[in-house]
Image (cartoon, rainbow, N blue to C red):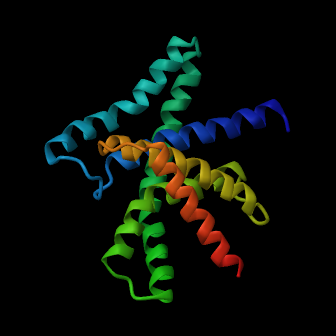
């Protein structure tokens, strides 16, 4: 793989993380005080500029910084639009397997930002040719999910302790064992 292609993929992963933070901050189910939402809204608007300012501090040329501004804006617009389709698809899948109650809807709502970003990021990395690249999607989703959960828990004022990590690992192992039967 050429260096240019490696750089393109790296850039897609970076912009995916930036947009994921932006989508998380505006999530309607984010458990933060109402007065904190206005602050988060302003923060969301400053995130792209902060990234571009960091690139300036690193000595990146202005034409490349403008490209980053455009890329972030373009991906944010696309991912924000696509999250509605992702939510609808998740609701359709979940409701086909069982009645979709409040807990099911809450889980779907919470996961919409990370699923949307993972799907769209995978599509961009693969240049639309995603067939047969399920392992890459799973890796992208797992990495973005870990980042999302840790960021969201901290934003909501929680902590992820070693005991919490162990409990999650234990539940994951049990779930895999049940699926294997």
In this view, the residue in front, 15 or 28, is 28
Which residue sits furthest right?
A: 1
In this view, the residue in front, 43 or 165, is 165
Residue 70 is left or right of residue 138, and the answer is left
Residue found at x 38% / y 46%: 153
**Does residue 181 lie above or below 37 as drawn?**
below
The answer to whether any part of residue 121 appears in the image is yes
In x, y percent, where is residue 106? 34, 68
In x, y percent, where is residue 132? 79, 65
In x, y percent, where is residue 39? 22, 36
Residue found at x 59% / y 15%: 61
Residue 33 is left or right of residue 69, and the answer is left
Quadrant housing the C terminus: bottom right
In this view, the residue in front, 154 or 66, is 154
In this view, the residue in front, 138 or 103, is 103
Residue found at x 76% / y 66%: 131
Quadrant housing residue 129: bottom right
Quadrant housing the N terminus: top right
The answer to whether any part of residue 129 appears in the image is no
Residue 127 is left or right of residue 81, and the answer is right
In x, y percent, where is residue 55? 53, 19
- Report how many numbered discs are placed on residues in the image: 0
Residue found at x 62% / y 41%: 12
**Does residue 65 lie above or below 125 as drawn?**
above
Quadrant housing residue 119: bottom right
Which residue sits furthest left?
A: 35
**Does residue 91 lie above or below 134 as drawn?**
below
């Amino acid at each position: 793989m050429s260096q240019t292609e490696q750089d393109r993929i790296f850039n897609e992963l970076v912009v995916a993380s930036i947009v994921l933070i932006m989508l998380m901050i505006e999530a309607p189910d984010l458990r933060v005080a109402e007065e904190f939402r206005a602050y988060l809204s302003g923060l969301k608007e400053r995130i792209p500029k902060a990234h571009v300012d960091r690139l300036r501090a690193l000595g990146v040329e202005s034409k490349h910084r403008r490209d980053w501004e455009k890329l972030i804006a373009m991906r944010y617009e696309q991912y924000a639009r696509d999250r509605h389709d992702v939510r609808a698809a998740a609701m359709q899948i979940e409701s086909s397997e069982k009645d979709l109650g409040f807990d099911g809807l809450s889980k779907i709502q919470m996961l919409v930002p990370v699923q949307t970003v993972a799907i769209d990021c995978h599509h961009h990395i693969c240049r639309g040719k995603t067939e047969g690249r399920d392992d890459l999607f799973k890796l992208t989703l797992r990495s973005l999910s870990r980042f999302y959960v840790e960021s969201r828990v901290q934003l909501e004022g929680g902590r992820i302790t070693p005991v919490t990590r162990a409990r999650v690992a234990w539940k994951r192992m049990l779930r895999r064992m049940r699926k294997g039967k």
